[in-house]
Image (spheres, helix red, strand yellow):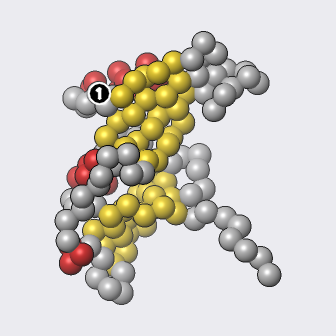
Amino acid sequence: MRLAFKLLHTRYRVNDLAASVRFYQDVLGLSEIRRIQSPRGSELVFLKAPESDETIELCSYPASGPVQVQPDLTHLAFQVDSLDAFGKHLATLGLKYSDGPHMKPDGSGFAFIDAPEGYEIELIQRAKGPTSTY
């Protein structure tokens, strides 16, 4: 018997599906790959980063009440080429990092931004070469 062997997607329930989809597309560059209505009535949108196999499932299900994300509950992490360049991209959208960037001597670093509903997004810049700490 084979046990769990591949992560397929991670679900985040959201209050405003349209705003959340815009955020993940415009800020992070993810692509919508599927949109469906579940049998129980929730609306689901699946998004994917260009070099990832796993997807993010955004779920709108108003019948279960408003989403209230407590601080430091969970986060998604994405690799970026440059935290400096990504920070400039955020500025063009009127946004900024909520924490960081925090850089290491090897050139690696990380920073956070806040998605709608307060979900944290971590951006990771890996060091160039074989000594990367991320």
Residue 67 in percent (x, y) is at 24, 62
Tell me where residue 84 sits by quadrant. Answer: top left
Q: Position of residue 101 (x, y in %)?
A: 43, 22
Q: Is residue 110 visible?
A: yes
Q: Number of callouts in the render?
A: 1
Mark 1: secondary structure: loop
User: Which residue in the rendered view is the most extreme toward the top?
Assistant: 105
Residue 90 appears in the rendering: no
Residue placed furthest toward the bottom = 39
Seen at 36% across and 87% down, the residue is 39
Q: Is residue 49 rendered to the left or right of residue 29?
A: right
* On-image quarter of the C terminus: top right
Above or below for 56 versus 120: below
User: What residue is at 54 percent from the left and 36 percent from the top?
Assistant: 79
Locate residue 42, reporting x and y percent.
Answer: 30, 76
What kind of residue is marked 1? Lys
Category of crowding for the residue at label 1, using alpha-carbon neighbours closer than 10 angstroms: few (below 14), some (14–19), many (at least 20): some
Q: Which residue is mark 1?
A: 96
